[in-house]
Image (cartoon, rainbow, N blue to C red):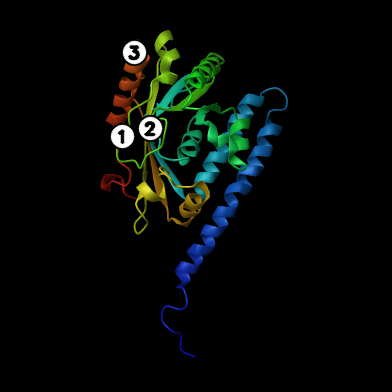
Amino acid sequence: MTAVPGTVPALGTRRRTAGSVIRLGLVPLWTGLCYFAWFVAGIGPGGKARRHRVVRGWAGTLLRILRIRVSFSGKPPRPPFLLVSNHLSYLDVIVLASLVDTRFVAKREVRRWPLFGSAANAIGCIFVDRDTPRDAIRAGQAMQEAYEAGNGIVLFGEGTSSEGATVLEFRPALLEWPARDGRPVHTVALSYHQGPGDPPASHSLCWWGEMTFMPHLAGVCRLGPSMARVVFGAAPVTASDRRALSETARAAVLADFTPSGSAECAL
């Protein structure tokens, strides 16, 4: 019997498809297991440290499942800190959670995501409605209280994600309290880089515009090995008012930023 060309997928294609399905199934399975472990870890003395280890383990293993290698330079800050980052994807949370013990500031819609929203709420994400000025005041107070309690906080300064070509303007509303109190603000620059033969990182790893979560995640699971590049700023920045602080922090991130998918960072 002679096979008709093009009717039977190549062995490598079938294996890659099967692998992507397995990875897609492992993501919620591993997240659910760690969600349970996080609750158990909080029982008894030393619960906070154990919970940080659970979150680090969740993030590190999830990156291995998704075949995303993290390359970082600079020194990650230690709590308490406020770390301001550019924003490219929900993957940013996983990448940064693998490197620092922190709470994240996230848009309120994340709370409604199946499983991931519950997990984000459990680990202490500070949710904010960016379109409501009064809610920004509330979220800023929650950030300040978390900082003063000894926590690390990650804020995505742009307030939205992008395709990774540049760093958008930072929104100053949530930087009122560090500017007022003279708190140092650490910075970090993120970028993603796809492997050979895969779609550009701007459309395969970055998540922005009208992209929806599950189809994007399924696409990430179909990719070959890729890389997240993380550059922590050499020194924290300060400024006396929130607008100047947002501009100074953006300039620091932009100085360390590499556009996603650029040749110099190719795998």
Q: Say left or right for 253 vs 22.
A: left
Does 35 sit above or below residue 49?
below
Q: Inspect this view and state whether residue 102 appears.
A: no
Tell me residue 208's x, y (percent): 41, 42
| Pointer 1 residue | 257
Which residue is most to the bottom? 1
Q: Amino acid at mark 1?
A: Phe
Label ID, residue 115: none
Q: CA distance from mark 3 to mark 2?
A: 19 Å
> Which residue appears at 54% of the width and 35% of the height?
109
First in sequence, mark 3 or 2: give its number.
2
Q: CA distance from mark 1 to mark 3?
A: 21 Å
Question: Nearest the camera: 30 or 124?
Answer: 124
Q: CA distance from mark 2 to mark 1?
A: 9 Å
Does 77 sit above or below residue 7?
above
First in sequence, mark 1 or 3: give its number.
3
| Pointer 2 residue | 86
User: Do the residues bearing badges 2 and 1 touch, measured as CB atoms within 8 Å?
Assistant: yes
| Pointer 3 residue | 239
Tell me residue 135's x, y (percent): 52, 21
The 10 Å Cα crowd at callout 1, few under 14, some 14 to 19, many 20 or more, is many
The 10 Å Cα crowd at callout 2, few under 14, some 14 to 19, many 20 or more, is many
